[in-house]
Image (spheres, coloured by chain):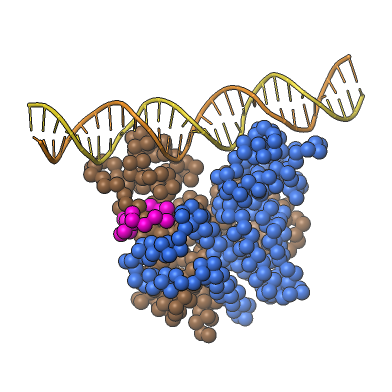
Chain colours: A blue, B brown, C orange, D yellow
Amino acid sequence: MCEWIYPGAVTSKPFNSVWFREPRKVASPGRSREEIVRAAMELLDSEGIDGLSMRKLGAKLMSGATSLYWYVANKDELLELVYDEIWGEIAVPDPETVGWRNAVSVMAHSMRQVMLRHPWSADLIGHMPALGPQALTVADRTRRAFKLAGFTGLDIDYANGTLTAYVFGMTIPQIAWNAAMADSDYDSQALADQVAMAAADFPDLLEGIRADQYEDPGTVRELAFDFGLVSVLDGLERRLAK
Amino acid sequence: MCEWIYPGAVTSKPFNSVWFREPRKVASPGRSREEIVRAAMELLDSEGIDGLSMRKLGAKLMSGATSLYWYVANKDELLELVYDEIWGEIAVPDPETVGWRNAVSVMAHSMRQVMLRHPWSADLIGHMPALGPQALTVADRTRRAFKLAGFTGLDIDYANGTLTAYVFGMTIPQIAWNAAMADSDYDSQALADQVAMAAADFPDLLEGIRADQYEDPGTVRELAFDFGLVSVLDGLERRLAK
DNA sequence: ACAGGACTCGTACAGTGTGCGAGTGGATTT
DNA sequence: AAATCCACTCGCACACTGTACGAGTCCTGT
C-alpha cells in the first residue's frame, strides 16, 4: 500500500514529496503507515478535508497526536499518501481485451465515481502532483490504451492528459456544488429559483437553467458528463484519422 | 465590482452564498468591500492561499482584523468575492464578429492564463460554485458562442461545460506542479531524473517522460494544452455535424 | 547488566477564524 | 443645546490548528 519508496530517493535533493524520501524503518506490529492512512481516509470521507486534524486522527487511533509524526514527516505527506490511495480505486480495464475506447471510457466514469465518493480529492488535486505508485499505475494503463489507439510520440501523453483533464474539470466543480447544497437546507425548487434570480440579467443563461430545472439534477450531470466524454473521445479519434 | 446582490435575496432561505445575502449598507468613505477584496487578492497573489489570514489582511489595511467582519460575513464569503474577481479577468471575444470557434478558443487560453496568474484559484474551484456576476457574464458569453455554433437545447450548456471542464482540468494540475517546483530547490534535470525514477516500473510511461524531458516544460505544457483544446473543439464540432 | 534504538506523548508555541461587547465619533432628532 | 441613534472599530477571549522538542518507556542484542 504505502510502504513504497522510489530507489535512490535520499541522495538527491530537490523535490519535496513522500515518494522521494526514505521512510523510517518501522518494526512495530501496532501502528503503521497503512493504518494511519486508512484512518485518515475514513475521517476525510466522513468529515471532509477540514475534519482531518492530527489530534482527531490520533484520537481515532488511540494515540497521541504527535506520535503519528514517527510514521509521517508532516500532514502534507500524509495527504500525499491518502491522495495516492484514491487512484488505487480507479478501474482501468485492459485495452487489449475491451478496446482502447472502452477502456478509457470506463476509466473516466470510474474516476468520476471515485472522486464523488471522496470529495476531499478535489482539494488535493490542485495541491500536489500525482506521483504515487497508484497514480502512476493508472497513468501507465491509460497511456497504453492511447498507444494502442494509434497515437505516437508525445501525442500519447497529450491525449492521455486531455482525457484526464476533462474528468477532473467536470467533476471538481460538481463536488463544489454538492458541498454547497449539503451546507444549505437544500430545497431544489428554492435553489433553482435563486439561481434563476442570479442569472436574471442573462436571458440566454436563464433559458438554459430553466431547461434542466425539471430534470433530476443527478441525471442531468450524468448526461452532461457523457456528452462531454463522447465529444472528447471523438475529438481525439479525429486526431488519429489525420 | 462586488456591491452586487441578487434581488429578493434575503427572503428565501436555502443557499449560503454572498450572492444571496443583502450586504450591509455602508456609508463610510474609507474602507469598503472593493478595497478589502483588492487587498485580499494582492495577498493571495503574493503569498498564496495560506498567506491570506484575516489578521494579515487587517494589518495590510491598517485596521483590526475583526473590523473586516463589518463588510463581510466571514472568510468564506470574502473568498467568494475574490473568486468572482478572476472571472472578470477572462477575455471572451464577441462570437458574432470573430466566429464561435475563435471566441471560445481565446476564452480558453485567457482562462488558463488567468488561473496561472492567480494560482490560488485552483483551491477555490472545488470549494464553491461560480455564481457571481462576473462568472455568470463569462458563462453567458461562451454560451452564446455555442448557441451561435449551432447547438440547441441542453446541448448548448453541455458543450459549454465540456470546454470549461477541459480548461479547469488541464490547468489545476499544472498549478500543483508549479507550486511543488517552487517549494523545492528546483533543478529541472534532477527533477526529471527523480520523476523518471518514480516511473521506473512503468517502461511505457518512462518513454513518455524521457521524450519531453529535453523540451522546455513551459512550451510542452502549451503544446499539450493546444492539443487538447483542438481535440475538444473538434469533438464538439463533430457533434454538430450529426 | 548495560546500551541503544524504536517508539510514545505531554507540553508549548505561534498561528488561525470569529463571537462578543465595549467604545467612538458624527449626524439626526428633540 | 442636549439627547439619541447608529455606523463602524477593535481588543479580548475561545477553541482549534500543525508541529518542534525533549523526556520517558519498552524491547532487543550483547
Side of A157 relative to C2 (left or right): left
Side of B93 relative to C9 (left or right): left
Q: Nearer the viewer, residue B164 or A171?
A: A171
Is the C terminus of chain A in the top left, top right, bottom left or bottom right quadrant?
bottom right
Q: Is residue B17 magenta?
A: yes
Disc count in the image? 0
Q: State the image quarter where residue A137 is shown.
A: bottom right
Q: Is residue A21 magenta?
A: no
Side of B210 relative to B60 (left or right): right
Query: Which segment is the magenta one?
Result: B4-18
Q: Residue at x 29, y 47 (%)?
A: B24
Q: Residue at x 73, y 44 (%)?
A: A35
Residue B2 appears at what percent x and percent y?
33, 53
Residue B15 appears at what percent x and percent y?
42, 56
Residue B149 appears at what percent x and percent y?
43, 79
Q: In this view of the protein, can residue B49 be seen by the observer?
A: yes
Q: Main secondary structure of the magenta part?
A: loop
Q: In the picture shown, does residue B238 fall above or below A90?
A: below
Q: Residue at x 33, y 44 (%)?
A: B71
Q: Nearer the viewer, residue B218 or A218?
A: A218
Q: In this view of the protein, can residue B219 be seen by the observer?
A: no
Q: State the image quarter where residue A145 is shown.
A: bottom right
